[in-house]
Amino acid sequence: MNWINLGLGILLALMIVLFIFRIVLTWYPQVELKKFPWSLIAIPTEPFLAPTRKIITPLGGVDITPILWVGIIALVRELLLGQQGLLRMF
């Protein structure tokens, strides 16, 4: 069970970091997300962001969906792996 908690914790932390990088990349619209170093950030995050953008459109040209996903993933991580998380109870 510890390996599952560790793996899930690392995966969720990595996703949070990728979404934070994605937030920073929204400040630079000239960056082509399909080119090599940026595609490492865009490929894992875009499946989450594309459907969310259909529900929450950019406000004043600012895409807030990566911020929303950072909050959602942080909440899930805390609920599952926090001090009193669901996976810590077993």
Image (cartoon, helix red, strand yellow):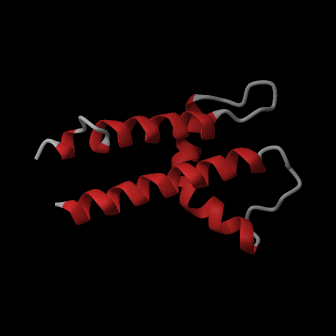
Residue depicted at x 73% and y 74%: 36
Residue depicted at x 81% and y 25%: 60
Left or right of residue 83, residue 39 in this image: right
| Image location (x, y in percent) of residue 81 | 30, 45
| Image location (x, y in percent) of residue 57 | 67, 30
Quadrant the N terminus occupies: bottom left
Residue depicted at x 58% and y 53%: 17
Toward the right, the furthest residue is 30
Left or right of residue 5, residue 78 in this image: right
Toward the front, the furthest residue is 83
Nearer the observer, 4 or 47: 4
| Image location (x, y in percent) of residue 79 | 30, 36
| Image location (x, y in percent) of residue 44 | 54, 60
Where is residue 2, by image quadrant? bottom left
Left or right of residue 27, residue 8 in this image: left
Residue depicted at x 81% and y 31%: 61
Toward the left, the furthest residue is 90
In this view, 87 is above or below 14: above
Number of disc labels = 0
In this view, 80 is above or below 33: above
Nearer the observer, 13 or 40: 13
Where is residue 70, by image quadrant? top right
Toward the top, the furthest residue is 60
